[in-house]
Image (cartoon, rainbow, N blue to C red):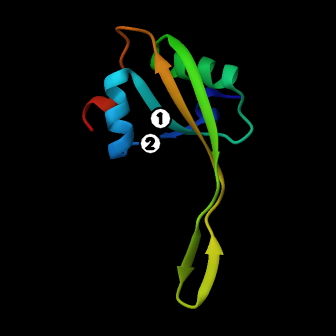
């Protein structure tokens, strides 16, 4: 798989911004991606060293549009811990 297909987008929220103090960054990733694939993709895209990858499957939420009810899509979240001294500049402006 192409690294840009594995890493879909960064997750920038208040909770994830607080994790950046501990050198942890959050991403939405492909649902079929494994931890070693995520690690290689982050190291290749951002040129950093990854020490740990934690993943979780996030279930879709019930949403309403008018009278219709439906669920958002399920997705996979990865929290990546970087080696001491490494940073991802994409998040620094957030």
Locate residue 9, reporting x and y percent.
50, 41
Give neighbour class at mark 2: few <14, some 14-19, many 20+ (Cα, 10 Å).
Answer: some
> Quadrant location of the C terminus?
top left
Locate residue 30, reporting x and y percent.
66, 40
- Residue at 61% x, 86% y: name it: 68
Estimate the spatial distance between the alpha carbons at disc 1 and disc 2, rounded to whole Å.
Answer: 5 Å
Callouts 1 and 2 close, C-beta under 8 Å: yes
Note whether 21 is above or below 71 in the view shown.
above
Find disc 1 in the rendering and name its residue. Answer: 26
Locate residue 13, reporting x and y percent.
36, 46
Note whether 88 is above or below 8 in the view shown.
above
Quarter residue 72 falls in: bottom right
Of callouts 1 and 2, which one flags the residue occurring earlier in the amino acid sequence?
A: 2
Of residue 61 and residue 37, the one placed in the foreground of this image is 61
Residue 11's disc is 2
Q: Is residue 39 left or right of residue 94?
A: right
Q: Is residue 44 left or right of residue 2?
A: left
Q: Secondary structure at mark 1?
A: strand
Quarter residue 88 falls in: top left
């Amino acid at each position: 798989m192409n690294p840009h297909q594995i890493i879909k987008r960064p997750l920038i929220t208040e909770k994830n911004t607080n994790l950046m103090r501990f050198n942890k960054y959050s991403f939405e990733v492909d649902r079929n991606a494994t931890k070693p694939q995520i690690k290689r993709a982050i190291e290749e895209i951002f040129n950093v060293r990854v020490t740990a990858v934690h993943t979780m499957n996030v279930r879709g939420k019930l949403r309403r549009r008018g009278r219709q009810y439906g669920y958002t899509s399920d997705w996979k979240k990865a929290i990546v811990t970087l080696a001491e001294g490494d940073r991802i500049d994409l998040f620094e402006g957030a």
